[in-house]
Amino acid sequence: MLKTLQIIFSILGISLSVYGLITHNHQLNFLMILLLGLFMLTLGISEFKRERKMVGWFLIGVFVFSVYVSIQSFVLI
């Protein structure tokens, strides 16, 4: 289940970033950052399952920071 979510979040995030690069339309960057943050969350959960707690906490921290940045950039639009 986590592997499927990782693949879905990464494909959606990468496709939004490619769309922004091709069209020079950067209005969806907050959504791309949010999706890649969710990808980091799924990676962090899988690292916790592997008993690698430090890496898991780091990835959870990256997720929290990316959600914060995503909300800030959504508010500024």
Image: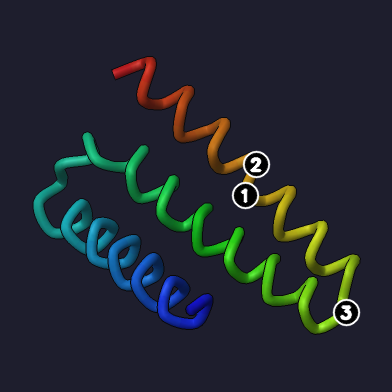
| Residue located 65% across and 41% down the image | 64
* Disc 3, SS: loop
Classify mark 1: residues with Cα within 10 Å, few (<14), some (14-19) or many (20+).
many
Lateral position of residue 36 relative to residue 16, left or right: right
- Residue at label 3? 51
Q: Residue 5's x, y, as percent?
A: 43, 71
Q: Residue 37's x, y, as percent?
A: 52, 53
Q: Amino acid at mark 3?
A: Glu
| Residue located 80% across and 83% down the image | 50
- Residue at label 2? 64
Residue 10, quarter of the rendered image: bottom left
- Residue at label 1? 63
Image marks 1 and 2: residues in contact by CB distance under 8 Å: yes
Label 1, label 3: how many angstroms apart (C-alpha)?
A: 19 Å
Nearer to the camera, 77 or 63:
63
Image: 30 above or below 13: above
In this rendering, the label closer to the viewer, 1 or 3: 3
Image marks 1 and 3: residues in contact by CB distance under 8 Å: no
Q: Residue 43's x, y, as percent?
A: 62, 71
In this rendering, the label closer to the viewer, 2 or 3: 3
